[in-house]
Image (cartoon, helix red, strand yellow):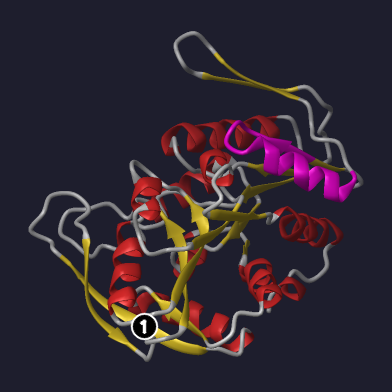
Amino acid sequence: MNSLQVFSGNANRPLAEEICQYLGVPLGRANTTRFPDGEFNFQILENVRGSDVFIVQPTCPPVDTNIMELLLMIDAFRRSSADRITAVIPYYGYGRGDKKDKPRIAISAKLVANLITHAGADRVLAVDLHAAQIQGFFDIPVDHLFASPVIIEYFLEQQIENLVVVAPDPGGAERARAYAKRLNADFGIVDKRRDKSRPGHAEAEVMNVIGKVEGRNVLIVDDMADTAGTLTKVAEALKKEGAKSIVASCVHAVLSGNAMERIANSPLEKVVITNTVPAEKARASAQYECLSVAPLLAEAIKSIHDETSVSRLFI
């Protein structure tokens, strides 16, 4: 493996270019066009025989399209005799389907893991999986990074006084507690329930705020913002409890539908996101602060290529 080569699909090419700039290597040349009927037309335009190949492709919306791109790219590199293929997936689509918590449903996170494995990937590099157990769905090595070092560094620079870090649900308590420890802040949780009588993904109903937030500056910590329903309702509940100011951090800014409108009409003063998925509209708004995970991913790629420890990137 004398040659490290980085390639990108169409999901988040700017992130791949930034990673390559950090590593000091050119982005691999490839045809990533589509046939008139919509099929992905991928062809590698480099010699990759014996190379250590990294494919940067978050499976963000359009999720099915980007997953299919990733699978076809992996297959092409396998058939072109790449020595090792690492799927760099900054955002793992279908990650919410990590268990069978209702009758007659699919475990989509496992199915996607099977597809990536059987397509020919040798390992996976991911950022903030929705559930940690997804690592175990793969039969190949998974390096699971967290964007927390990037986000925590930003908030340390802000020097927010009288800060309390809040988890939007009990499932996010571990993440929020880790942030609170690093930021030398207090910790709280919002208890919520979902109205399951509604079809599809029901709106979250906030029930109770656990922890003292009155007169304090609050940071809500979550892994992703999709429709922003939970995030905005949590912000409203915190405002009712007398929070002085409310900001949020979300690693994956999916921001589906009218999510940005919801956030604009909420008590949230600022939302800190990362570029794991493209978020051009959010990055153009003063209400959002977009941080780059390119250096984090580049360092992980370098460690994987050099066969050194990736754990140095954890906090």
Position of residue 264 in the picture relative to residue 76 (left or right): left
Q: Position of residue 131 (x, y in %)?
A: 44, 67
Inspect the image, locate mark 1, and give the three-letter code of the amino acid beneath it.
Answer: Ile
Quadrant housing the C terminus: bottom right
Q: Which residue is mark 1?
A: 189
Q: Nearer the viewer, residue 249 or 310?
A: 249
Residue 135 in the image, given as x and y percentages of width and height: 52, 64
Q: Which residues are magenta?
A: 6-24
Q: Residue at x 48, y 68 (%)?
A: 247
In the rendered structure, the answer to whether residue 96 lies left or right of residue 4 reads: left
Query: Is disc 1 surrounded by few (<14), some (14 to 19) or many (20+) residues within 10 Å?
Result: many
Is residue 57 one of those drawn in magenta?
A: no
Q: Would you say residue 81 is visible in this rendering? A: yes
At x 46%, y 31%, the residue is 65
Which of the 4 image quadrants contains residue 50? top right
Asked whether residue 221 is in view, the answer is no
**Picture residue at 83% right of the left edge, 41% below the top:** 51
Residue 12 magenta: yes
Is the residue 12 above or below the residue 122 in the image?
A: above
Q: In the rendered view, does 192 fall on the left or right side of 182?
A: left
In the picture as drawn, the residue positioned furthest to the left comes out as: 197
Q: Position of residue 150 (x, y in %)?
A: 68, 66
108 or 284: nearer the viewer: 284
Q: Is residue 132 above or below residue 117?
A: below
- Residue 88 vertical placement versus 148 (above, below): above
In which quadrant of the rendered view does residue 24 lie? Answer: top right
Q: Is residue 8 left or right of residue 63?
A: right
Image-quadrant location for residue 258: top left
| Secondary structure category for the residue under label 1 | strand
Taking 276 as reference, is 246 above or below it? below
x then y, percent, for residue 46: 82, 26
